[in-house]
């Protein structure tokens, strides 16, 4: 049986991995791209990369096609564009990036380290009103919050 970690490792080998500084350079150079944040809407509302759009990973397939309730026109029309997929840590976005390639998207990359790495590199995040998020707010929100009952029991 495969684990979540196994799936992520396999996805990493199938998808271009970029780091926050790579994305920052591409954005500064004006590269035509779509930054796709696949976190849940409540996460997206708290903080995001200003230029990103939100399509949760759970609806990525129908959001990338016409004629569905979840259809996101900017995503549907991005099959030939450079699409950078983002999440909190880079794991969900890896899986979503693989799905996009299966759906015919030509140039898909994953933001390795996700928004955590983006914030650690001190790049700007905004809230739902497009107000700046401080580094400390980013650190607190993006920190790993695994509860004791979620941890593997001692053997």
Image (cartoon, rainbow, N blue to C red):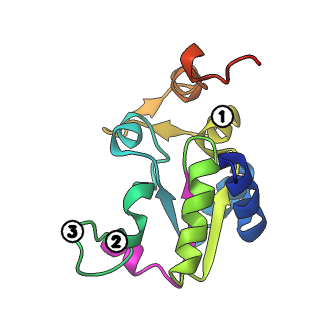
Could you tell me which secondary element the residue under label 3 belongs to? loop
Q: The C terminus lies in which quarter of the figure? A: top right
Q: Which mark is residue 62?
A: 2
Q: In the rendered view, tell whether residue 98 sits above or below residue 140.
A: below
**Among the two numbered marks 1 and 3 on one chain, the one whose residue lies closer to the N terminus:** 3
**Among the two numbered marks 3 and 2 on one chain, the one whose residue lies closer to the N terminus:** 2
**Among the two numbered marks 1 and 2 on one chain, the one whose residue lies closer to the N terminus:** 2
Q: Which mark is residue 47?
A: none
- Residue drawn at point x = 46 percent, y = 43 percent: 48
Answer yes or no: do the residues labelled 3 and 2 have beta carbons within 8 Å?
A: yes
Q: Which residue is mark 1?
A: 122
Answer yes or no: do the residues labelled 1 and 2 have beta carbons within 8 Å?
A: no
- What's the distance in space between the residues labelled 1 and 3, CA to CA? 36 Å
Left or right: 15, with 127 as reference point: right
Q: Position of residue 12 (x, y in %)?
A: 74, 60
Mark 3: few/some/many CA within 10 Å (<14, 14-19, 20+):
few
Left or right: 111, with 9 as reference point: left
- Residue drawn at point x = 57 percent, y = 23 percent: 150
- Total labels drawn: 3
Q: Position of residue 69 (x, y in %)?
A: 21, 68
Q: Over which residues does the magenta segment extend?
A: 73-86
Answer yes or no: do the residues labelled 1 and 3 have beta carbons within 8 Å?
A: no
Q: Position of residue 133 (x, y in %)?
A: 47, 29
- What's the distance in space between the residues labelled 1 and 2, CA to CA? 34 Å
Q: Which mark is residue 69?
A: 3
């Amino acid at each position: 049986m495969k684990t979540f970690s196994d799936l992520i490792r396999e996805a990493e080998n199938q998808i271009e991995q970029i780091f926050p500084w790579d994305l920052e350079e591409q954005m500064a150079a004006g590269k035509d791209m779509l930054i796709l944040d696949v976190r849940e809407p409540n996460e997206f509302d708290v903080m995001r990369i200003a230029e990103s759009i939100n399509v949760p990973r759970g609806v990525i397939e129908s959001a990338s096609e016409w004629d569905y309730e979840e259809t996101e026109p900017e995503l549907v029309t991005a099959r030939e564009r450079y699409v950078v997929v983002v999440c909190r840590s880079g794991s969900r976005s890896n899986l979503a990036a693989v799905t996009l390639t299966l759906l015919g998207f030509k140039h898909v990359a994953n933001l390795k380290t996700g928004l955590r790495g983006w914030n650690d590199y001190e790049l700007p995040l905004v809230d739902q009103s497009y107000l700046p998020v401080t580094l400390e707010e980013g650190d607190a929100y993006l920190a790993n919050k695994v509860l004791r009952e979620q941890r593997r029991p001692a053997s």
